[in-house]
Image: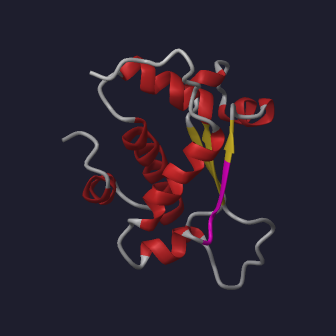
Amino acid sequence: MTQASPDMIAPDTLLIEQLARDTIATLPEPFRAAATHIALRIADFASDDMLTVMGIEDPFELTGLYEGIPLTEKSVSDQPLQPDVIWLFRRPILEEWVDRGNVSLGELVTHVTIHELAHHFGWSDDDIASIDPWWE
């Protein structure tokens, strides 16, 4: 077991973003190409507005959020008002990672990223499981 160093710091937003981008880079085609068109945003917590819309009081309860229109609901005649965005929230992700204690940070960020991509692509639970075997 690796011992914590006294000069270690918590993983920053850049690391969370890189782990999410690594996840996208390993998706099977055609999902990989399509996923690169989704904006990826990392913040410490969801905004108060996001939490209110979701009906969530505790900001630690939300690790990720997809903002956009799922591909299964888009029409070529629709004019995009804003880009689709996947939000990952660093502090809730780190809190869950510590609480679990049995998964790597990379595994957890992959899981949250895949879950949010599932909203974009309109994936079923079986689709998600084939890409992210989280429960194995």
Residue 116 visible? The answer is no
Residue 3 lies in magenta, yes or no?
A: no
Residue 119 at least partly seen? yes
The residue lying toward the viewer, choosing from 96 and 81, is: 96
Which quadrant of the rendered structure holds the N terminus? top left
Reply above or below: 121 against 63.
below
Q: What stretch is highlighted in magenta?
A: 37-41
Asked if residue 60 lies left or right of residue 125, the reply is right
Residue depicted at 66% across the width and 84% down the height: 76
**In this image, 29 relative to 121: left or right?**
left
**Residue 133: percent from the left, percent from the top?**
25, 49
Count of numbered circles on the image: 0
Farthest residue to the top: give it.
Answer: 6
Picture quadrant of residue 43: top right
Which quadrant of the rendered structure holds the C terminus?
top left
Q: Which residue is more in the foreground, 109 or 58?
A: 109
Which residue is located at x 59 percent, y 50 percent? 17
Q: Residue at x 25, y 59 (%)?
A: 130
Lateral position of residue 80 relative to residue 123, left or right: right
Residue 108 at x, y percent in the picture: 41, 38
Vertical arrangement, residue 95 with respect to residue 110, above or below: above
**Displayed quadrant of residue 16:** top right
Answer with the quarter of the image where residue 9 lies: top right
Q: How is the image coloured?
A: secondary structure
Q: Position of residue 100 (x, y in %)?
A: 36, 22
Q: Farthest left residue?
A: 136
Residue 78, given in percent of the width and then of the height, sits at 73, 78
Residue occupying the point 43% across, 53% down: 114
The main secondary structure of the magenta stretch is: strand
